[in-house]
Amino acid sequence: MRVLVVYDSQTGNTEKMAEAIGEGAREAGADVVVAKVDIVFVNYFYSADVLFIGSPCYFGNVSWKIKRLFDQGPNLVGEFKGKPAGYFASSGTKRDGEYTLYFLKRFLEIHQMRILPGILSVGEPDDEILRQCREYGLQVRTIEI
């Protein structure tokens, strides 16, 4: 199974979450690529059996780089129908982070992906959030492709 974890991170908080998700997926036996959004194009989604996407929160929304990633693919809507996808975010406040999760989920819904529940870290991810992220990655062993 191939897993792609794409993220943007300004302070390192979302990156820590992405790495923990990748660790969990590797532990589950997956071939994992954890990549910063700067080097990813939406057509990379084809190469993954499972996708995780993460963003920091900017004014209650995803980062412009994550938005740009999804803006590359309006002609690909439906191409990833049914592909399992998870999402995660880090934020300074719970309320704004929940908005960010909403937008990430909405992008995945538009692409008709099979969506896993999201994870939010308010502030720097603590040991509990990182544990949840590793478990999130471990879920790939139970996902039907």
Image: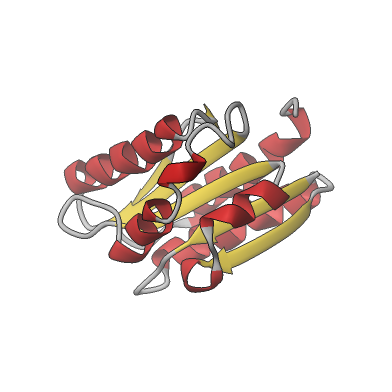
Q: In the visual, does 97 lie left or right of 46?
A: left
Q: Residue farthest to the front?
A: 75
Corner quadrant of residue 4: bottom right
Q: Residue at x 54, y 43 (%)?
A: 132
Q: Is residue 108 above or below residue 124?
A: above
Q: Residue at x 55, y 47 (%)?
A: 52
**Residue at left 29%, top 54%?**
62
Query: Where's the N terminus, which quadrant?
Result: top right
Asked if residue 105 lies left or right of residue 138, the reply is left
Please determine whether, in this image, residue 99 is positioned above or below residue 117.
below
Percent of width and height locating residue 109: 42, 30
The residue lying furthest to the left in this view is: 59
**Picture layout, residue 126 above or below residue 8:** above
**Percent coordinates x, y for residue 53 in the rendering:** 49, 50
Residues 89 and 130: in front is 89
Q: Nearer the viewer, residue 67 or 95?
A: 67
Structure colour scheme: secondary structure
Residue 8 percent across, percent down from the top left: 42, 65
- The total number of labels drawn is 0
**Residue 56 vs residue 6: left or right?**
left
Which quarter of the rendered picture does the C terminus lie within? top right
Whether residue 65 is situated above or below residue 88 in the rendered picture: below
Residue at 26 percent of width and 47 percent of height: 97
Quadrant of the rendered structure where residue 119 is? Answer: top left
Can you give x and y, in whole percent of width and height, for residue 23 in the image? 69, 57
User: Viewer-proximal residue, 130 or 61?
Assistant: 61
Q: Is residue 115 visible?
A: no
